[in-house]
Image (cartoon, helix red, strand yellow):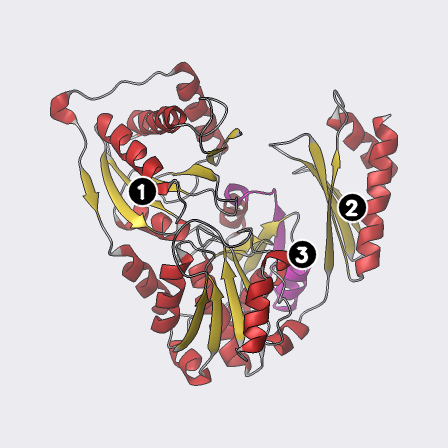
Amino acid sequence: MALIKSISGIRGTIGGRPGEGLSPLDVVKFTAAYGTWLSRNTENRKVVIGRDGRISGEMVKNLVVSTLNGLGIDVVDLGLSTTPTVEVAVKMENAAGGIILTASHNPKEWNALKLLNGEGEFISGEDGAQLLEIAASEDFNFADVNKLGTYTQDDSYLQKHIDLIVNYPLVDVEAIRKRNFKVVVDAVNSTGAIFVPALLNALGVEQVEVLFGEVTGKFSHNPEPLPENLVALSNEVNKSKADLGIAVDPDVDRLCFVCEDGSMFGEEYTLVAVADYILSKRKGNTVSNLSSTRALKDVTLKHGGEYTPSAVGEVNVVKKMKETNAVIGGEGNGGIIVPDLHYGRDALIGIGLFLSHLAHSGKGIKALRNSYPDYFISKNKIELDKGVDVKVIFEKIKDKYKNQPINTEDGLKIEFETDWVHLRTSNTEPIIRIYAESQNETTADNIAKRIMQDIKEFMH
Protein backbone atom coordinates (compact mmCIF):
# COMPACT_ATOMS: atom_id res chain seq x y z
CA MET A 1 0.00 0.00 0.00
CA ALA A 2 1.26 3.48 -0.77
CA LEU A 3 0.21 7.07 -0.14
CA ILE A 4 2.32 9.77 -1.79
CA LYS A 5 1.76 13.39 -0.85
CA SER A 6 3.43 15.70 -3.33
CA ILE A 7 2.87 19.24 -4.51
CA SER A 8 1.00 18.11 -7.60
CA GLY A 9 -1.53 16.15 -5.59
CA ILE A 10 -2.24 13.12 -3.45
CA ARG A 11 -1.64 9.69 -4.97
CA GLY A 12 -2.19 6.29 -3.47
CA THR A 13 -3.30 2.73 -3.84
CA ILE A 14 -6.96 2.15 -2.99
CA GLY A 15 -7.72 0.41 0.30
CA GLY A 16 -5.65 -0.45 3.36
CA ARG A 17 -5.27 1.51 6.55
CA PRO A 18 -5.74 5.31 6.63
CA GLY A 19 -2.42 7.07 6.03
CA GLU A 20 -0.96 4.00 4.32
CA GLY A 21 -3.08 3.88 1.16
CA LEU A 22 -5.64 6.19 -0.42
CA SER A 23 -8.43 5.23 1.97
CA PRO A 24 -11.82 7.01 2.06
CA LEU A 25 -10.62 8.89 5.16
CA ASP A 26 -7.55 10.15 3.26
CA VAL A 27 -9.70 11.26 0.31
CA VAL A 28 -11.93 13.25 2.68
CA LYS A 29 -9.00 14.73 4.61
CA PHE A 30 -7.08 16.00 1.57
CA THR A 31 -10.22 17.21 -0.20
CA ALA A 32 -11.16 19.13 2.97
CA ALA A 33 -7.62 20.60 3.08
CA TYR A 34 -7.94 21.70 -0.56
CA GLY A 35 -11.39 23.24 0.00
CA THR A 36 -10.14 25.00 3.15
CA TRP A 37 -7.07 26.32 1.31
CA LEU A 38 -9.34 27.69 -1.46
CA SER A 39 -11.71 29.33 1.03
CA ARG A 40 -8.80 31.16 2.64
CA ASN A 41 -7.63 32.52 -0.71
CA THR A 42 -10.80 33.39 -2.56
CA GLU A 43 -14.49 34.25 -2.12
CA ASN A 44 -15.24 32.05 -5.15
CA ARG A 45 -17.20 28.97 -4.10
CA LYS A 46 -17.09 26.90 -7.30
CA VAL A 47 -14.90 23.85 -8.03
CA VAL A 48 -14.89 21.73 -11.20
CA ILE A 49 -14.21 18.00 -10.97
CA GLY A 50 -13.79 15.21 -13.51
CA ARG A 51 -12.42 11.68 -13.49
CA ASP A 52 -10.71 9.12 -15.68
CA GLY A 53 -12.10 5.60 -16.16
CA ARG A 54 -10.67 3.97 -13.04
CA ILE A 55 -12.63 1.32 -11.11
CA SER A 56 -12.42 3.44 -7.93
CA GLY A 57 -13.42 6.67 -9.72
CA GLU A 58 -17.10 6.72 -8.77
CA MET A 59 -16.39 6.02 -5.09
CA VAL A 60 -13.65 8.66 -4.86
CA LYS A 61 -15.85 11.17 -6.71
CA ASN A 62 -18.73 10.73 -4.22
CA LEU A 63 -16.37 11.35 -1.29
CA VAL A 64 -14.87 14.44 -2.95
CA VAL A 65 -18.27 15.93 -3.86
CA SER A 66 -19.75 15.42 -0.39
CA THR A 67 -16.67 16.85 1.33
CA LEU A 68 -16.61 19.98 -0.85
CA ASN A 69 -20.38 20.44 -0.42
CA GLY A 70 -19.87 20.07 3.34
CA LEU A 71 -17.44 23.01 3.20
CA GLY A 72 -20.06 25.14 1.43
CA ILE A 73 -18.44 24.73 -2.00
CA ASP A 74 -20.50 24.27 -5.19
CA VAL A 75 -19.32 21.41 -7.38
CA VAL A 76 -19.60 21.15 -11.17
CA ASP A 77 -19.01 17.50 -12.10
CA LEU A 78 -17.88 16.77 -15.66
CA GLY A 79 -18.18 13.02 -15.05
CA LEU A 80 -15.88 10.86 -17.21
CA SER A 81 -13.42 13.39 -18.55
CA THR A 82 -9.72 14.07 -19.18
CA THR A 83 -7.13 16.08 -17.28
CA PRO A 84 -6.87 18.77 -19.99
CA THR A 85 -10.67 19.02 -20.28
CA VAL A 86 -11.01 19.77 -16.57
CA GLU A 87 -8.22 22.37 -16.87
CA VAL A 88 -10.07 24.08 -19.72
CA ALA A 89 -13.40 23.90 -17.82
CA VAL A 90 -12.00 25.61 -14.70
CA LYS A 91 -11.27 28.71 -16.78
CA MET A 92 -14.49 28.61 -18.80
CA GLU A 93 -16.57 28.17 -15.61
CA ASN A 94 -14.68 30.95 -13.78
CA ALA A 95 -14.21 28.44 -10.98
CA ALA A 96 -11.92 28.81 -7.96
CA GLY A 97 -10.16 25.56 -8.85
CA GLY A 98 -10.52 21.98 -9.95
CA ILE A 99 -9.80 18.42 -8.91
CA ILE A 100 -9.04 15.66 -11.41
CA LEU A 101 -9.52 12.15 -10.08
CA THR A 102 -6.81 10.23 -11.88
CA ALA A 103 -3.55 8.50 -11.15
CA SER A 104 -2.41 9.24 -14.69
CA HIS A 105 -0.30 6.35 -16.04
CA ASN A 106 -0.28 4.35 -12.77
CA PRO A 107 -1.87 0.86 -12.75
CA LYS A 108 -5.55 0.29 -11.88
CA GLU A 109 -5.13 -0.05 -8.09
CA TRP A 110 -4.01 3.60 -7.90
CA ASN A 111 -6.04 6.77 -7.83
CA ALA A 112 -5.23 10.38 -7.02
CA LEU A 113 -6.48 13.91 -6.51
CA LYS A 114 -4.75 16.24 -8.98
CA LEU A 115 -5.28 19.77 -7.73
CA LEU A 116 -5.79 22.88 -9.86
CA ASN A 117 -5.88 26.61 -9.11
CA GLY A 118 -8.28 29.15 -10.60
CA GLU A 119 -6.20 29.35 -13.79
CA GLY A 120 -6.82 25.66 -14.42
CA GLU A 121 -3.13 24.97 -13.75
CA PHE A 122 -1.53 22.67 -11.18
CA ILE A 123 -1.09 24.38 -7.84
CA SER A 124 2.42 25.64 -7.05
CA GLY A 125 4.87 24.08 -4.61
CA GLU A 126 4.16 26.87 -2.15
CA ASP A 127 0.39 26.33 -2.32
CA GLY A 128 0.89 22.57 -2.07
CA ALA A 129 2.94 22.99 1.10
CA GLN A 130 0.21 25.14 2.70
CA LEU A 131 -2.39 22.56 1.77
CA LEU A 132 -0.40 19.68 3.30
CA GLU A 133 -0.04 21.73 6.48
CA ILE A 134 -3.82 22.25 6.67
CA ALA A 135 -4.30 18.50 6.15
CA ALA A 136 -1.76 17.58 8.85
CA SER A 137 -3.41 19.87 11.44
CA GLU A 138 -6.95 18.96 10.24
CA ASP A 139 -7.77 22.64 10.56
CA PHE A 140 -11.16 22.40 8.81
CA ASN A 141 -14.34 24.36 9.42
CA PHE A 142 -17.40 22.83 7.75
CA ALA A 143 -20.47 24.83 6.72
CA ASP A 144 -23.71 24.88 8.67
CA VAL A 145 -26.83 23.35 7.16
CA ASN A 146 -28.06 26.54 5.48
CA LYS A 147 -24.77 27.04 3.65
CA LEU A 148 -24.02 23.62 2.16
CA GLY A 149 -22.70 23.62 -1.40
CA THR A 150 -24.64 22.52 -4.49
CA TYR A 151 -23.92 19.74 -6.97
CA THR A 152 -24.47 19.98 -10.73
CA GLN A 153 -23.45 17.68 -13.56
CA ASP A 154 -22.24 19.11 -16.87
CA ASP A 155 -21.46 16.86 -19.82
CA SER A 156 -20.99 19.69 -22.34
CA TYR A 157 -17.20 19.95 -21.99
CA LEU A 158 -16.32 17.09 -24.33
CA GLN A 159 -17.79 19.19 -27.14
CA LYS A 160 -16.45 22.50 -25.81
CA HIS A 161 -12.89 21.14 -25.65
CA ILE A 162 -13.16 19.64 -29.15
CA ASP A 163 -14.50 22.96 -30.48
CA LEU A 164 -11.49 24.78 -29.01
CA ILE A 165 -9.16 22.40 -30.85
CA VAL A 166 -10.99 22.39 -34.17
CA ASN A 167 -11.05 26.21 -34.13
CA TYR A 168 -7.41 26.58 -33.06
CA PRO A 169 -5.69 28.63 -35.82
CA LEU A 170 -2.93 26.09 -36.55
CA VAL A 171 -5.20 23.03 -36.66
CA ASP A 172 -6.05 22.51 -40.35
CA VAL A 173 -9.17 20.35 -40.50
CA GLU A 174 -9.43 20.63 -44.29
CA ALA A 175 -5.88 19.36 -44.82
CA ILE A 176 -6.47 16.47 -42.39
CA ARG A 177 -9.74 15.52 -44.08
CA LYS A 178 -8.09 15.49 -47.52
CA ARG A 179 -5.43 13.02 -46.38
CA ASN A 180 -8.16 10.52 -45.46
CA PHE A 181 -6.09 9.01 -42.65
CA LYS A 182 -6.84 5.58 -41.28
CA VAL A 183 -6.08 5.58 -37.53
CA VAL A 184 -5.95 2.95 -34.80
CA VAL A 185 -6.35 4.24 -31.20
CA ASP A 186 -5.25 2.46 -28.03
CA ALA A 187 -7.63 3.92 -25.41
CA VAL A 188 -6.48 1.63 -22.55
CA ASN A 189 -10.04 1.19 -21.17
CA SER A 190 -10.26 4.78 -19.96
CA THR A 191 -11.70 8.11 -21.09
CA GLY A 192 -9.53 8.33 -24.20
CA ALA A 193 -12.08 5.87 -25.62
CA ILE A 194 -14.72 8.63 -25.46
CA PHE A 195 -12.64 11.71 -26.26
CA VAL A 196 -10.11 10.63 -28.90
CA PRO A 197 -12.54 9.10 -31.47
CA ALA A 198 -14.91 12.09 -31.03
CA LEU A 199 -12.01 14.46 -31.70
CA LEU A 200 -10.78 12.47 -34.72
CA ASN A 201 -14.26 12.53 -36.26
CA ALA A 202 -14.45 16.30 -35.71
CA LEU A 203 -11.07 16.61 -37.46
CA GLY A 204 -12.46 14.80 -40.52
CA VAL A 205 -10.87 11.42 -39.81
CA GLU A 206 -13.53 8.87 -40.75
CA GLN A 207 -11.59 5.61 -40.46
CA VAL A 208 -11.00 5.11 -36.74
CA GLU A 209 -10.50 1.78 -35.04
CA VAL A 210 -10.37 1.70 -31.22
CA LEU A 211 -8.55 -0.93 -29.16
CA PHE A 212 -9.52 -1.40 -25.49
CA GLY A 213 -12.45 0.94 -26.08
CA GLU A 214 -14.64 0.00 -23.13
CA VAL A 215 -14.30 2.39 -20.18
CA THR A 216 -13.97 -0.23 -17.45
CA GLY A 217 -10.81 0.95 -15.68
CA LYS A 218 -9.56 -2.65 -15.97
CA PHE A 219 -6.58 -1.64 -18.08
CA SER A 220 -5.80 -4.33 -20.68
CA HIS A 221 -2.09 -3.59 -20.34
CA ASN A 222 0.19 -1.42 -18.23
CA PRO A 223 -1.33 2.01 -18.96
CA GLU A 224 1.94 3.91 -19.38
CA PRO A 225 2.33 4.55 -23.14
CA LEU A 226 5.78 2.96 -23.49
CA PRO A 227 6.83 0.75 -26.44
CA GLU A 228 6.68 -2.48 -24.40
CA ASN A 229 3.03 -1.74 -23.49
CA LEU A 230 1.91 -0.88 -27.03
CA VAL A 231 2.50 -4.24 -28.74
CA ALA A 232 -1.21 -4.76 -29.52
CA LEU A 233 -1.45 -1.27 -31.09
CA SER A 234 1.69 -1.85 -33.10
CA ASN A 235 0.40 -5.18 -34.46
CA GLU A 236 -3.03 -3.76 -35.29
CA VAL A 237 -1.61 -0.75 -37.19
CA ASN A 238 0.43 -3.18 -39.25
CA LYS A 239 -2.35 -5.70 -39.80
CA SER A 240 -5.04 -3.19 -40.74
CA LYS A 241 -2.64 -1.18 -42.95
CA ALA A 242 -3.44 1.98 -41.01
CA ASP A 243 -1.59 5.27 -41.58
CA LEU A 244 -0.74 5.59 -37.89
CA GLY A 245 -1.55 4.52 -34.36
CA ILE A 246 -2.34 6.84 -31.45
CA ALA A 247 -1.86 5.95 -27.78
CA VAL A 248 -2.86 8.05 -24.76
CA ASP A 249 -2.63 7.39 -21.03
CA PRO A 250 -5.78 7.00 -18.86
CA ASP A 251 -6.27 10.75 -18.29
CA VAL A 252 -5.30 11.79 -21.84
CA ASP A 253 -2.46 14.21 -21.10
CA ARG A 254 0.27 12.05 -22.65
CA LEU A 255 0.41 11.19 -26.33
CA CYS A 256 2.47 8.95 -28.55
CA PHE A 257 2.30 7.62 -32.07
CA VAL A 258 3.02 4.40 -33.92
CA CYS A 259 4.29 4.50 -37.53
CA GLU A 260 2.56 2.71 -40.41
CA ASP A 261 5.03 -0.21 -40.20
CA GLY A 262 4.23 -0.74 -36.50
CA SER A 263 7.45 0.90 -35.27
CA MET A 264 7.38 3.58 -32.59
CA PHE A 265 7.49 7.26 -33.56
CA GLY A 266 9.03 7.70 -30.09
CA GLU A 267 7.23 9.51 -27.26
CA GLU A 268 10.16 11.94 -27.02
CA TYR A 269 9.41 12.98 -30.60
CA THR A 270 5.73 13.84 -30.11
CA LEU A 271 6.74 17.26 -28.77
CA VAL A 272 9.58 17.63 -31.30
CA ALA A 273 7.24 17.14 -34.27
CA VAL A 274 4.51 19.43 -32.92
CA ALA A 275 7.08 22.12 -32.06
CA ASP A 276 8.55 21.87 -35.57
CA TYR A 277 5.09 22.51 -37.01
CA ILE A 278 4.24 25.40 -34.68
CA LEU A 279 7.64 27.08 -35.15
CA SER A 280 7.28 26.85 -38.93
CA LYS A 281 4.10 28.95 -38.59
CA ARG A 282 5.07 31.34 -35.78
CA LYS A 283 8.49 32.32 -34.49
CA GLY A 284 9.20 31.81 -30.83
CA ASN A 285 10.85 29.94 -27.99
CA THR A 286 10.44 26.46 -26.55
CA VAL A 287 10.81 24.76 -23.16
CA SER A 288 11.08 21.13 -22.10
CA ASN A 289 12.35 19.51 -18.93
CA LEU A 290 15.99 18.60 -18.36
CA SER A 291 15.35 14.91 -19.01
CA SER A 292 13.85 15.47 -22.49
CA THR A 293 15.57 14.93 -25.83
CA ARG A 294 18.00 17.42 -27.31
CA ALA A 295 16.11 17.16 -30.60
CA LEU A 296 13.72 19.90 -29.41
CA LYS A 297 16.66 22.27 -28.99
CA ASP A 298 17.90 21.38 -32.50
CA VAL A 299 14.48 22.05 -34.06
CA THR A 300 14.09 25.31 -32.11
CA LEU A 301 17.48 26.66 -33.20
CA LYS A 302 16.73 25.64 -36.80
CA HIS A 303 13.66 27.92 -36.69
CA GLY A 304 15.60 30.77 -35.06
CA GLY A 305 14.07 30.42 -31.59
CA GLU A 306 15.63 29.95 -28.16
CA TYR A 307 15.34 26.74 -26.18
CA THR A 308 15.31 26.72 -22.36
CA PRO A 309 15.36 23.64 -20.12
CA SER A 310 13.29 23.50 -16.93
CA ALA A 311 13.23 21.34 -13.82
CA VAL A 312 11.19 18.13 -14.19
CA GLY A 313 7.45 18.43 -13.46
CA GLU A 314 4.65 20.12 -15.39
CA VAL A 315 4.37 23.05 -12.98
CA ASN A 316 8.10 23.82 -13.55
CA VAL A 317 7.77 23.59 -17.33
CA VAL A 318 4.80 26.00 -17.25
CA LYS A 319 6.66 28.48 -15.03
CA LYS A 320 9.65 28.50 -17.42
CA MET A 321 7.35 28.81 -20.45
CA LYS A 322 5.78 31.94 -18.95
CA GLU A 323 9.21 33.41 -18.12
CA THR A 324 10.57 32.87 -21.65
CA ASN A 325 7.32 33.56 -23.50
CA ALA A 326 7.49 30.12 -25.14
CA VAL A 327 5.05 29.35 -27.97
CA ILE A 328 5.23 25.61 -27.30
CA GLY A 329 6.60 23.42 -24.54
CA GLY A 330 6.14 20.21 -22.65
CA GLU A 331 7.80 17.05 -21.49
CA GLY A 332 9.56 14.25 -23.31
CA ASN A 333 7.00 11.74 -22.09
CA GLY A 334 4.58 12.83 -24.81
CA GLY A 335 3.22 15.83 -22.90
CA ILE A 336 2.41 18.85 -25.09
CA ILE A 337 1.60 22.30 -23.71
CA VAL A 338 0.16 24.89 -26.11
CA PRO A 339 0.07 28.09 -24.04
CA ASP A 340 -2.49 30.10 -25.99
CA LEU A 341 -4.96 27.20 -25.57
CA HIS A 342 -4.17 26.49 -21.89
CA TYR A 343 -1.11 25.85 -19.73
CA GLY A 344 -1.46 22.10 -19.31
CA ARG A 345 -0.36 18.92 -21.08
CA ASP A 346 -3.07 18.08 -23.57
CA ALA A 347 -3.02 15.02 -25.83
CA LEU A 348 -6.10 16.26 -27.70
CA ILE A 349 -4.57 19.49 -29.04
CA GLY A 350 -1.44 17.41 -29.64
CA ILE A 351 -3.42 15.13 -31.97
CA GLY A 352 -4.91 18.09 -33.86
CA LEU A 353 -1.52 19.74 -34.39
CA PHE A 354 0.34 16.52 -35.20
CA LEU A 355 -2.19 15.46 -37.84
CA SER A 356 -2.10 18.98 -39.34
CA HIS A 357 1.70 18.70 -39.54
CA LEU A 358 1.53 15.23 -41.07
CA ALA A 359 -1.10 16.37 -43.59
CA HIS A 360 0.92 19.43 -44.63
CA SER A 361 4.16 17.45 -44.90
CA GLY A 362 2.66 15.18 -47.56
CA LYS A 363 4.75 12.37 -46.06
CA GLY A 364 3.93 9.18 -44.24
CA ILE A 365 4.54 9.23 -40.49
CA LYS A 366 7.71 7.11 -40.75
CA ALA A 367 9.22 9.50 -43.29
CA LEU A 368 8.31 12.43 -41.02
CA ARG A 369 10.08 10.74 -38.10
CA ASN A 370 13.15 10.15 -40.27
CA SER A 371 13.37 13.88 -40.97
CA TYR A 372 14.36 14.51 -37.31
CA PRO A 373 17.77 13.97 -35.75
CA ASP A 374 18.06 10.57 -34.09
CA TYR A 375 18.83 10.55 -30.40
CA PHE A 376 18.66 7.66 -27.99
CA ILE A 377 17.89 8.06 -24.30
CA SER A 378 19.11 5.44 -21.89
CA LYS A 379 16.94 5.42 -18.74
CA ASN A 380 18.43 3.85 -15.62
CA LYS A 381 18.17 3.98 -11.86
CA ILE A 382 20.42 3.08 -8.99
CA GLU A 383 19.25 2.19 -5.48
CA LEU A 384 20.82 4.16 -2.67
CA ASP A 385 22.33 2.56 0.39
CA LYS A 386 20.64 3.57 3.63
CA GLY A 387 21.86 6.88 5.05
CA VAL A 388 23.67 7.97 1.88
CA ASP A 389 23.86 11.77 1.45
CA VAL A 390 23.01 12.44 -2.17
CA LYS A 391 24.27 16.03 -1.95
CA VAL A 392 27.78 14.78 -1.16
CA ILE A 393 27.70 12.36 -4.10
CA PHE A 394 26.47 15.08 -6.48
CA GLU A 395 29.23 17.44 -5.28
CA LYS A 396 31.87 14.80 -5.99
CA ILE A 397 30.47 14.12 -9.46
CA LYS A 398 30.28 17.85 -10.15
CA ASP A 399 33.91 18.16 -9.20
CA LYS A 400 34.96 15.23 -11.38
CA TYR A 401 33.25 16.74 -14.45
CA LYS A 402 33.89 20.40 -13.63
CA ASN A 403 35.24 21.13 -17.12
CA GLN A 404 31.86 20.29 -18.71
CA PRO A 405 28.77 22.55 -18.80
CA ILE A 406 26.71 21.67 -15.70
CA ASN A 407 23.11 22.55 -14.77
CA THR A 408 22.04 22.11 -11.12
CA GLU A 409 18.47 23.41 -11.38
CA ASP A 410 17.04 19.92 -10.85
CA GLY A 411 19.56 17.37 -9.67
CA LEU A 412 22.63 17.42 -11.90
CA LYS A 413 22.85 17.62 -15.69
CA ILE A 414 26.24 17.34 -17.42
CA GLU A 415 26.67 18.08 -21.13
CA PHE A 416 29.28 16.58 -23.46
CA GLU A 417 29.26 18.02 -27.01
CA THR A 418 25.93 16.62 -28.31
CA ASP A 419 25.48 14.12 -25.46
CA TRP A 420 24.22 14.65 -21.92
CA VAL A 421 23.49 12.85 -18.68
CA HIS A 422 20.90 13.89 -16.08
CA LEU A 423 20.86 12.64 -12.48
CA ARG A 424 18.01 13.31 -10.12
CA THR A 425 16.62 11.78 -6.97
CA SER A 426 13.10 10.40 -6.86
CA ASN A 427 10.48 12.06 -4.63
CA THR A 428 8.91 8.71 -3.94
CA GLU A 429 11.70 6.10 -3.52
CA PRO A 430 15.36 5.95 -2.38
CA ILE A 431 16.89 5.95 -5.87
CA ILE A 432 18.80 8.18 -8.25
CA ARG A 433 17.45 8.22 -11.81
CA ILE A 434 20.12 8.44 -14.50
CA TYR A 435 19.09 9.51 -18.01
CA ALA A 436 21.74 9.73 -20.73
CA GLU A 437 21.27 10.75 -24.35
CA SER A 438 23.42 10.35 -27.43
CA GLN A 439 23.04 9.96 -31.19
CA ASN A 440 24.30 6.44 -30.65
CA GLU A 441 22.44 3.95 -28.47
CA THR A 442 25.57 2.25 -27.16
CA THR A 443 27.17 5.59 -26.30
CA ALA A 444 24.09 6.62 -24.31
CA ASP A 445 24.22 3.33 -22.37
CA ASN A 446 27.94 3.71 -21.79
CA ILE A 447 27.62 7.28 -20.45
CA ALA A 448 24.95 6.09 -18.03
CA LYS A 449 27.08 3.12 -16.95
CA ARG A 450 30.10 5.36 -16.39
CA ILE A 451 28.11 7.73 -14.15
CA MET A 452 26.55 4.83 -12.27
CA GLN A 453 30.05 3.52 -11.65
CA ASP A 454 31.03 6.97 -10.28
CA ILE A 455 27.99 6.97 -7.97
CA LYS A 456 28.85 3.51 -6.63
CA GLU A 457 32.43 4.59 -5.97
CA PHE A 458 31.37 7.78 -4.19
CA MET A 459 28.79 5.90 -2.09
CA HIS A 460 31.49 3.91 -0.31
Q: Please name the amino acid that badge 2 sits on.
A: Pro
Q: Is residue 315 magenta?
A: yes
Residue stretch rendered in magenta on the structure: 293-316
Does the image show residue 168? Answer: no
Residue closest to the eye, 92 or 261: 261
Tag 3, which secondary structure? Answer: loop
Q: Is residue 269 magenta?
A: no
Marks 3 & 1, CB-CB < 8 Å contact? no
Residues under labels 3 and 2: Cα distance? 17 Å
- Establish if 326 lies above or below 232: above
Q: Earlier in the sequence, mark 1 or mark 2?
A: 1
Q: Please name the amino acid that badge 3 sits on.
A: Thr
Q: How many marks?
A: 3
Q: Position of residue 208 (x, y in %)?
A: 42, 73
Q: Position of residue 336 (x, y in %)?
A: 51, 57
In the visual, does 348 lie left or right of 247? left
Q: Please name the amino acid that badge 1 sits on.
A: Ile
Residue at 45% in and 24% down: 132
- Establish if 226 lies above or below 145: below
Q: Which residue lies under the disc numbered 1?
A: 49
Residues under labels 3 and 1: Cα distance? 33 Å
Q: Which residue lies under the disc numbered 2?
A: 405
Q: Residues within 10 Å of mark 2 (few under 14, many from 20)?
A: few
Tell me the quarter of the picture where residue 137 sits: top left
| The disc label shown at residue 293, or none | 3
Q: Residues within 10 Å of mark 1 (few under 14, many from 20)?
A: many
Residue at 43% in and 62% down: 349
Q: Position of residue 366 (x, y in %)?
A: 63, 75
Q: Position of residue 139 (x, y in %)?
A: 35, 16
- Establish if 435 lies above or below 128: below
